[in-house]
Amino acid sequence: MLKVDLHCHSNVSDGVLPPADVAATARKAGVDAWALTDHDEVGGIAAARIAAQEQGMRFVPGVEISITWASTTVHIVGLQVDETNPVLVQGLAKTRSGRDARGREMAEQLAKVGIEGAYEGALKYVGNPDLMSRTHFARFLVDSGVCASIPEVFRKYLVEGKPGYVPHRWATLTESVEWIRAAGGVPVIAHPGRYGFNIVTEGALFDEFKQLGGSAIEVVTGSHTPDQYQTYAEQARRYGFLASRGTDFHAPGESRVDFAVLPNLPSGLKPVWHDWF
Ligand code: AMP
Ligand code: MN
Ligand code: MN
Ligand code: MN
C-alpha cells in the first residue's frame, strides 16, 4: 500500500525546514506520495516538486488556506492546484496581507503582560516575511523560556481570551473553494475535529462546503485523536466526501505525530488520491 502524506509545512510558512528537507524527511520515513501544503502560500511548490522527484516520491502541489467561517478560523487545503494560477496566487496574496500588522499587535499585547520584544523575537524564526504566524511566536516563547512547550503556549497565550490573541478576518469559505477550483485543485476541509463545532454547526459547514463544490475532508491527520479518525470516517461516509490523510508536519520533534506512526485511512473510504496514483 502506498504511504501517502498530503499535509505538510515548510519554512515558506510556519514549518522550520526548507521544502527540499521536508521532502527528504518524509521520504526517509517511507512516504511514497507527498504534498506540500504551506499556509496561504505556494512559494515552496517549485522546490518541493524537484525534491520529491529526486527522492522518488509522487508529488501533489498543495496549499492550506486560512478562512473565517461562523466567526471561527477554519483551514481549507487545496490539492493538485496549479500554483501559477492567477486567481489562486492573487487570492493567497490578499489572505497573507495583514499578517505583519497582526504580529505587531500580538507583540503589543504580550508586552502588556511583561513579555518584551516578541515581534523581533518571533521574526527571527520567520522564513518568509509575508507569513508571520502564531507558530513563530510560539517558538520564540518556548526558546526564551516563557513556556516549556508549544502546546503550553497555545493554552496560555495566542488563543481567544488569552494575551497575544488578535482576532483576524481571513478569506471566506466561498473564496477558498473558488480559488482552489480555479487552479484546477480539489478543496479539502483540514482537520475538522479541531474546530470545536457541535454536530449541527459542523453539519452546516459540511453542507455549505459541498454545495460550493468541496469534495473531501481530512480523516487521518496529526491534528486528530484516534477516536476522531473514526468520527470523521463516519462523517465522510455520511456526507459522501473523499478522505484525506496527512501528518500536518511542521518540524522534527514538534509535530503531534511523526510521519512513521500515522495510521492508514480506515477501510470503506474513498481516498482523495484514488485516481492520482
Ligand atoms: P496562524 O495562521 O498565524 O493563526 O497560526 C496557526 C498555526 O498555529 C497553525 O497552523 C498551527 O501550526 C499552530 N497552532 C495553532 N493551535 C495550535 C496548538 N494548539 N498547538 C500547536 N500548534 C498550534
Ligand atoms: Mn501551521
Ligand atoms: Mn491547519
Ligand atoms: Mn497545517
Image: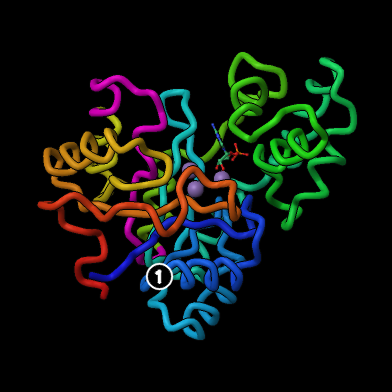
In terms of depth relative to the viewer, which is nearer, 245 or 143?
143
Give coordinates of residue 201: x percent, y percent: 29, 22
Drawn side of residue 25 relative to residue 186, left or right = right
Q: Badge 1 local density, few (<14 within 10 Å), some, or many (20+)?
A: some
Give coordinates of residue 112: x percent, y percent: 84, 16
Give coordinates of residue 70: x percent, y percent: 41, 24
Mark 1: which secondary structure? loop
Residue at image position (84%, 40%) is 121
Drawn side of residue 206 relative to residue 238, left or right = right
| Quadrant in the picture for the C terminus | bottom left
Q: Is residue 193 magenta?
A: yes
In terms of depth relative to the viewer, which is nearer, 114 or 168?
114
| Quadrant in the picture for the N terminus | bottom left
**Quadrant of residue 189 within the rendered picture:** top left
Drawn side of residue 191 relative to residue 142, left or right = left
In terms of depth relative to the viewer, which is nearer, 143 or 67?
143
Residue at image position (36%, 73%) is 32
| Magenta segment | 183-203
Drawn side of residue 211 relative to residue 53, left or right = left
Q: Is residue 277 above or below residue 178?
A: below
Residue at image position (66%, 37%) is 134
Residue that badge 1 annotates: 30
Of the four image quadrants, the one with ligand 2 is top right
Give coordinates of residue 125: x percent, y percent: 77, 50
Task: Please say which color scheme the image uses.
Answer: rainbow
**Quadrant of residue 230 within the rendered picture:** top left
Q: Is residue 3 above or below residue 231?
A: below
Q: Amino acid at mark 1?
A: Gly
